[in-house]
Each structure stands twice: as C-alpha cells, then as structure tokens.
Image (cartoon, rainbow, N blue to C red):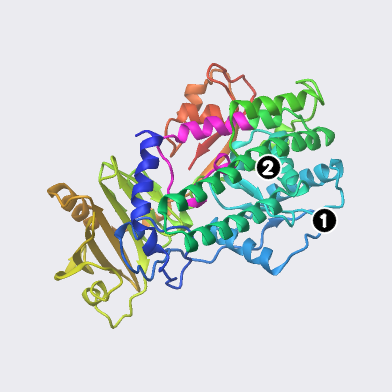
Amino acid sequence: MSSGRADRTVTSVAELTDRAARFGESAGRRLLAAPALLCAALTLSACGNLGRFETSAPSTSSPAKPNRTVAQTPASEREHERILSSYGGAYDDPRLEALISKTVDRLVAASDRPDQAYRVTILNSGAVNAFALPTGQLYVTRGLIALASDTSELSSVLSHEMAHVLAKHASIREDQARQAAVVTRVVTDMSNDPDLTALALAKTKLTMASFSRSQEFEADGIGVGISARAKFDPYGAARFLSAMERNAALKAGKTSLDPRAQDFLSSHPATPERVQNAQSSARQFASPQSGERDRETYLAAIDNIVYGEDPSEGFVRGRRFLHPKLGFSFAAPDTFTLDNTAQAVIGVREGGTQAMRFDVVRVPAEQSLAEYLNSGWMEGVDKGSTEDITINGFPAASATAHGDSWQFRVYALRFGSDVYRFIFAAKQKTTESERNARETVNSFRRLTLDEIQAARPLRIKVITVQPGDTVESLSHRMAGVDRPAERFRILNGLDQHAQVKTRDRVKIVVD
C-alpha cells in the first residue's frame, strides 16, 4: 500500500471521527491530546473514557543534564510533562546521558552563545525525532540515537536544535501559532462563507509552512558551523539527513497514526536541496576527512539500547498485539495493519473500507457490560442488538451501531479489573466485516508464562565483522524487523553497494 493511499485512508477516517475525540476523558490512565482515530471515526457526539493501557507512569528522572540550569516556567514545565507523557517518558541510560552531556558541553563552548543553557532529555520512543523548546530544553528519541552512526551525526542533530533556540525559531513558531489561532477564530466567527474560511486558513498554514522551511535551512547552517568549531566532522549533518531520508523511505506505506511515531522529517523536511545545503555549509569549514566522528565511543554507548517499541506498553508483531505486562494478546485480520498509538491500538484494512480500535475503559464493577454499551457513550447503538456473551472464558457484551457513513460492531470485555473495548467500523456491513470483527475478538486471550517471559524488547547489539561475514549474512541475524538487509544498511550508514569489512564494528537488531 502506497504512502499516498495510507495518508488518504487515515485522513478520511480521522475526519469522520475528530469531533467525537474532543469529548474523550481520561479513564485514570494516560490520555493524549492527539485525535483518537476511530472514536472520532464513529461520528459520535461523545466518546468518553478513552484510556491507554499501561502499567506505570512515565519516568521523569532521567534527562541528560549538562552543568547548566535551564530557566523553567510553569508553561515550559507543563509542556515538558506533556512531552514525557506523549513519548513514553524519559529513557534511562547513564552511558548515553554521559555521552550527550559531554557532546552538548563541547557544542555550547563552540557556539556564539556559551551562556545559553540547555537540558537534554532522551525520550523512550522508537520514532526518529528531535525538537527544542524556547527555554533550551532539547529532546532526542532513542530511535534517533539508534539510527545515528557516530558522535558527529548526533552532534549535528543537537547543534541543529540548539540553532533553533539561538535563532529564536521556537519562540517565533509559538507566536505564529498564536496568530494562526486568532485568525482561525476571527474568520470562523465572522464569516458564513465556508470557502472564504477555508481559503484564509489555507493561506495561514501555507505561510507558516514556508517560514518553517526557511528556519530549517538556517538552523542547518548554524548547526554545521557549531559542530565544526567543536571539532566534530561537519559532514555528519549531511550523512544523517541522508540516513533519515532512507529510513523514511523504508517506512513508506506504513504511515503511523500515532503522533509519537512521527519522525524528524515530519517537522524538519529533508529534501535533496537540504542535504546539498548541509554539504555546502560543511565545505566552508573542512575537507571531507577532517573533524572527529568518534564512532567507537558512540557505538559503545548505544550498545544494548532498546530498539523500536517498548514492550512495557504493549507492542505489535505482524498482525498480533501483545501486552506482556498486562498479560493478554489478540490478532487482527490478515488484511489489517496494526498501529500501537498513544491512545489505543488502531487497525486499518487495506483500502480503508474497514477499521478497528482497541482501548481500555473504566466501567464500575457493579455495572454490567451490556449496560455500559447502552449507557450513551456512543450514538446510534441499537439497544435491541445488545447481548451478553463469553469470549475465551471472559465475560463480554456486544452491540451494533449505525452512523451516517459507517456501520459499527462494538465489544466490551472484562479482563481482571479492566474492561477492554473493541470498536469495528465498516463502510458497509458485509459477511467479511462481521467475520473480521468476530475472529479478532475471539483471538483475545491470556498470555502464557512462557510467552510473557519471551516478550523482550528488541535491542541494538554492536558486533565485530568476522572474516566471511557479508551484509546478507549479518542481516540474517537481525530479529523482529522487516526488510532486514535494507534495515542493516541504513543502521550502519552503508549505501546500496557498500560491503562490510573485517574488524568493522556494526549494529544489528536482536531480541
């Protein structure tokens, strides 16, 4: 499925469901501000108790901290907490924190503002992303750290984000966002012409997008200069931009519905012109061989880092979703692509004619599941269709519901003290859509102890290339990733025809 088709599918479902998501309330577990696909798709007037199954609160205790104090405001602290909750908390790894702190110290000393304080937080997310707050709070995901091949590439990202702070880009973006909100409100309130409203909003968004691209080029130039003056290889930026483009291309057709999974290129567009711009900036400071890459130190620091999803929040393997901490699993139909988002597990059928949502809700112990389904959280429920059932020994209830453009089959299932909800949406009720819903729900089961113990996170392992090793043989040792040979090349900065050399240190993914 092409990325274009995926984008259109997501948009059509999200548009149908966005109104309802705004009424969601936390079920005592984390609930993010991102639109809840499918709950919104349900054309409901309310979609209450949307929760996120998890077993512990995100850690807030592991930011990498240079020896400087970032001025915090109540607003920035709230934003920091929101970011932590959105990205699975902070990732605790003393070796990485030490490497990042040392790198940032070098970059700060080489910048035009050595008095500017920064505080770096490693986010527990497999997405490839980094961003900055105006205060100097920088964020980098472990997914980005795993993709980088040496310290100079990491320094290019950190210096790029520092450049946004130094050039006050983050502050300007906040001002632009506030202005856009004002324009939106004024135009919406004063105009009864939907075409005029859409035109005004489109112009506002276009202006902001254009300005953002200009900021990225400026931040690239400033960042390359900082890295070069800090004695890092200035070509690290161009190499890493290329790696991110290749990584994004590998993901094409698997567009994530989760805002946490949006990568660096979503907000930092990388084009061939941008790579060329980074290379041109680097030439001003050094030859391709000059500057420190510090690959060995970097690889030693990232050895054993978690790669991809963190099983503590559940994870997708193919069409199965497993949550070892909570002890359950289910499987989606063959034609569905699953995505473990911040609010729910979302499944979309090829072509976008069917979709599903799995989440947790709070239902009082004294309330029956049939009563819950008929309690008004969802419009259009056919109360006459509601029935109590049993699924693999667990009490459950099901009902059908009807919307303007979608037909729904809804299940509530009690597992221990929690109630889980399956919502299936289909453009048209068919034998296939009913079978898909029934088979998915019937696949819900308790994990065995062996399965729970075997559900370990994927990790990056750094190994030494031995005589006879090839890209193909090493990629066969990769676990839990699709297209392993391409993934191996991208992770190790190897182009399509490059081969590994004996005694090289390389990254592979293992479980």
Q: Which residues are magenta?
A: 241-267
Which callout, 1 or 2, points at the residue further toward the start of the chain? 1
Circle 2 residues within 10 Å: few <14, some 14–19, many ≥20: many
Amino acid type indicated by mark 2: Ala
**Principal secondary structure, stretch drawn in magenta:** helix
Q: Is residue 102 left or right of residue 120?
A: right
Q: Quadrant of residue 294?
A: top right
Q: Position of residue 84 (x, y in %)?
A: 59, 59
Q: Which residue lies under the disc numbered 1? A: 67
Q: Depth check: 421 or 184 in front?
A: 184
Labels 1 & 2 near each other (Cβ < 8 A)? no
Task: Say which mark, if any, is on residue 416.
Answer: none
Kindly state the secondary structure of the residue where label 2 is placed: helix
* In magenta stretch: residue 310: no
Amino acid type indicated by mark 1: Asn
Q: Which residue lies under the disc numbered 2? A: 301
Q: Depth check: 87 or 114 in front?
A: 114
